[in-house]
Every structure is written in structure tokens, then in C-alpha cells.
Amino acid sequence: MAIDIRKVTVLGTGVLGSQIAYQTAFRGFDVTAYDINEPALEAARERFAKLAAAYIAEVPGAAGGKAEQTASGIALTTDLAEAVKDADLVIEAVPEVLTLKQEIYRHLGEVSPERTIFATNSSTLLPSDIKDSTGRPDKFLALHFANQVWKFNTAEIMGTTDTDPAVFRALVDFAEAIGMVPIEVHKEKAGYVLNSLLVPFLNSAMALGAGGYADPEAVDKTWRIATGAPMGPFQILDVIGLTTPYNILAHGDEDAQRLAAWLKDNYIDKGKLGIATGEGFYRYSA
């Protein structure tokens, strides 16, 4: 029997959670977004408005009112049980803290319909770290998006040994339906495909900058000219935001912690967090 996904709930309305909710709604799904309090929901409304403007500028078919209708059509709530009561799929995009994710999944398992599929957008944790907390490991897997989902539209799908193959296929179909390119990961791998390639690349670039070998601009110029890539590693870091790599590096080995300290001292402590704040390795106009 085919699994029909029409009602989607997104938990967490931060940068990526709001993008996932908006893209899913833009492609015609019934979307509810959950966050912990009213200030978080107000921030989500602002993010949806900015996404509407970005889609009008960059996405075919978004003009003529569709982008604004998408933003206004996403239901917002701070009541978890209300958020998931009719959900076919819940996509979790809460902070990368294992105990937090485990706690929310334990609650989710109690208040969600039996049919509901759970998907984590975690980029650093394996789904097997979380599956026992869900109460339904056969209906749980990872669905990982890249930042700026409307442009960098990969969706990495990775299950555990307990994930029902029919659930895996349903998520592949869902990813296609919301305009993503599904990337099937056949067994669990920390970093999936994207971050297994991207993180060492970005760390190598930061090592060149932190070591004084070359300025970020020179590193990026070298990469763009020599490979034909549209962006260099420091430009990519500005898109991601410097807080995320800092948090990962700060919990790494001695070399990683040195890179974290360089980021903190030279950029983060000066409010240079990337595009979102108007300056990171580069300056950006409003």
C-alpha cells in the first residue's frame, strides 16, 4: 500500500526549518510549523516574509501573489500536540543537541498518530542515535537539506537498519514532490554525502587562512579560477554562517580547536557571522 504524504509538520523555525516549511508549502503541501514560544513564531513570520521576497526574485512562478500566499498559508503553533495531530510527516529541525532531540521525539511519539513518519534534518547526528527515542524506529529516518533549499536543492535520505523500505521510498518520492533532488544514502554515514565532502574542504580552507598562508579572498579566487566553481570555500562559509562551523570545530581535536579559536577571535567576537549579519569573511549590502 502506497504511503500518502499531504500534511507536513516542521519542528523548529530557525534558518533551515523555516526554509523547509516554506519550500514544502510552496509546492502545495499543507504545512504546520512548530516552535517553542511566541517570539520564535514571530521570528518565523519574518523569515517567511524574507523567503517570499527571495522566491519572487529567484524562483520561476513565485510572482503574482504565490510567494506571499505561501508565507501566509503556513500554520504556526507553540502546541506540539496540535501541530502534529493530523501529520503524515514530521520533519524535525531543532538544534543539534542529542538530548534535546531525544526528548522531543519521546514526546512526539506520544502525541502523533500511529501512521506519522518522523524525519530528522540533523547534519551531524546519525539517525540510529535517535531512533529508540521515537517509539517507531521503522517509521524514522534522516532527511537532510542544504541551506538555501530553493537553490541548493539536494535532500539526503538516510535510514537505519530498522527503517521500513516503504517509508524510505515514500521520503524519496516526497523529496521529489517538493522540488528536491533525492540523494539516497544506502547505509549510515556521519556527514552523509554532502558534509563528508564539504567539511574537510572548508576546514582545509580555514587552515590556509588561519595559518597565514593566504587571505580568504586569495583562497576563494584560486578555487574559482582553477575549478570553475561559482563560489570559493570562504564564500560558502558566509552562506552557512560562521556559528555552525565554530560549534563543530570547538568540539573537535586540537587542530580543530585552533581553527575554532581563529574564527572566534577574528570574526565571531566582532559580530562577523556571515551573510545573515551583513559581514563575515566578506561584507554584504542589505
Image (cartoon, rainbow, N blue to C red):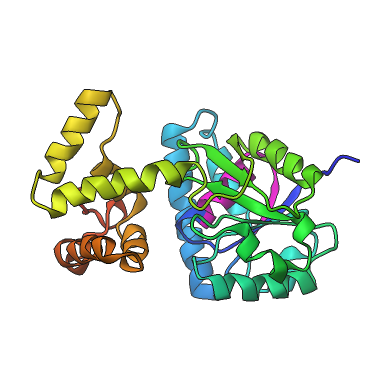
**Residue 11: x, y in percent?**
61, 63
| Residues shaded magenta | 17-32
The answer to which quarter of the image holds residue 170 is top right
Residue 113 in the image, given as x and y percentages of width and height: 83, 63
Q: Residue 168 falls in which quadrant of the image?
A: top right
* Residue 20 covered by magenta stretch: yes
Residue 76 horizontal/vertical position (percent): 62, 63
**Can you say which quadrant of the picture contains the N terminus?**
top right
Note whether 150 is above or below 137 in the view shown. above
Q: Percent position (x, y) of residue 9?
A: 68, 58
Q: Is residue 13 above or below residue 215?
A: below
Residue found 9% across the figure and 46% down from its top:
213
Q: Is residue 224 above or below residue 258?
A: above
Q: Residue at x 78, y 63 (%)?
A: 136
Foreground residue among 54 and 86 = 86
Classified by dominant secondary structure, the portion drawn in magenta counts as helix
Residue found at x 62% / y 58% = 127
